[in-house]
Amino acid sequence: MEWTKRKEKRTRWYAFCERSNLLLDQLTYQIEKAGVSFEWAFTGAVAANVYAPVLTSVDVAEIIVPPRRAEELAREIGLKPADKGANITIVERDGASLLFRDSYQNYQATLASPFIFYLDLLDGRARNKELAQRVLEKLEL
């Protein structure tokens, strides 16, 4: 599959969050408060669980940014680099990953297209397979 062969830079970060189930809300608030000037979007499990809830909570987040913007985003919202214990992964991508972004339900968070976070869930980590299946069902594919 072409998606799994794509080249992207992934960096791992840590942000203290008193209640891990509020990580998405906290990051959204910090990004908006910082006035980040480039496009970005949540993807992976945190986005999928907003779009098609399956899990009680998701305590990690993946954020897509354009190439060479990860460190800028991390600096602007106060993330710390983390080799171990990371709860945020910033993925630098170009192409279609930031097209058709949207927000869902009561969340102000900007999410990638459901097709993008579905593809990102195919990595097989944790309960991502179950989330991917739920996203497919909701997309009615």
Image (tube, helix red, strand yellow):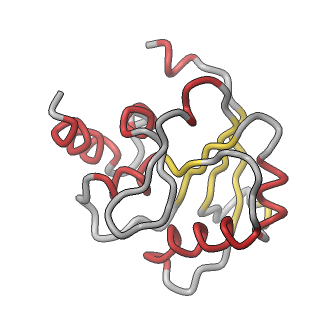
Residue nearest the viewer, comparing 118 with 59: 118
Q: Residue at left 68%, top 65%?
A: 31
Please identify the quadrant where the C terminus is shown. Answer: top left
**In the image, residue 23 lies at what x, y percent?**
52, 72
Q: Residue at left 81%, top 64%?
A: 76
**In the image, residue 129 lies at what x, y percent?**
29, 41
Q: Residue at left 77%, top 34%?
A: 67
Number of marks present in the image shown: 0
Asked if residue 64 lies left or right of residue 112, the reply is right
Which quadrant of the structure image shows residue 98? top right
Residue nearest the viewer, comparing 23 with 65: 65
Asked if residue 13 lies left or right of residue 3, the reply is right
- Answer above or below: position of 52 versus 34: above
Which residue is most to the bottom? 18
Asked if residue 23 lies left or right of residue 89, the reply is left
Residue nearest the viewer, comparing 13 with 65: 65
- Answer above or below: position of 25 versus 136: below
Which residue is most to the top? 2
**In the image, residue 21 lies at what x, y percent?**
43, 75
Which quadrant of the structure image shows residue 27? bottom right
Q: Residue at left 43%, top 13%?
A: 1
Which quadrant of the structure image shows residue 103? bottom left
